[in-house]
Image: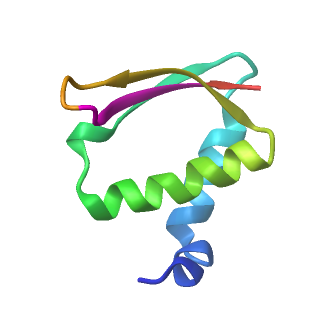
Amino acid sequence: MTKVEFLKSKEYRDRMNEIKNYSEGFEFVILLYNMTKKQRCKMRIVIQDAIREGLIEPTQIRVSLSGNITEVKYRRL
């Protein structure tokens, strides 16, 4: 699935609506180490769009000893 196809998909709309329905100040964590590469790519698209729209902001990033990002905490604005 290409990025353009994903942006038109029901899955993308569902994820964005889920973020929009969070109450202001709600914090959530995305565990990247549990995801497949495909899931991480899709999540990155959703998160970048949500940040660009001013819906969320990253508040904490955890990194493994090898330098890989393992989880990111976001707050709903």
Count of residue discs: 0
Q: Residue furthest front?
A: 66
Seen at 28% across and 36% down, the residue is 68
Seen at 71% across and 16% down, the residue is 25
Seen at 23% across and 38% down, the residue is 33
Does residue 74 lie above or below 33 as drawn? above
Q: Quadrant of residue 5?
A: bottom right
Seen at 76% across and 49% down, the residue is 52
| Quadrant in the picture for the C terminus | top right
Q: Position of residue 37 (x, y in %)?
A: 27, 60
Whether residue 66 is in magenta: the answer is: no
Q: Position of residue 58 (x, y in %)?
A: 60, 27
Does residue 16 lie above or below 28 as drawn? below
Is residue 9 toward the left or the right of residue 69 in the image?
right
Q: Which range is magenta?
A: 67-74
Q: Quadrant of residue 54?
A: top right
Q: How is the image coloured?
A: rainbow
Q: Position of residue 66 (x, y in %)?
A: 19, 31
| Quadrant in the picture for the N terminus | bottom left
Prevailing secondary structure class for the magenta stretch in the rendered image: strand
Is residue 68 toward the left or the right of residue 24 in the image?
left
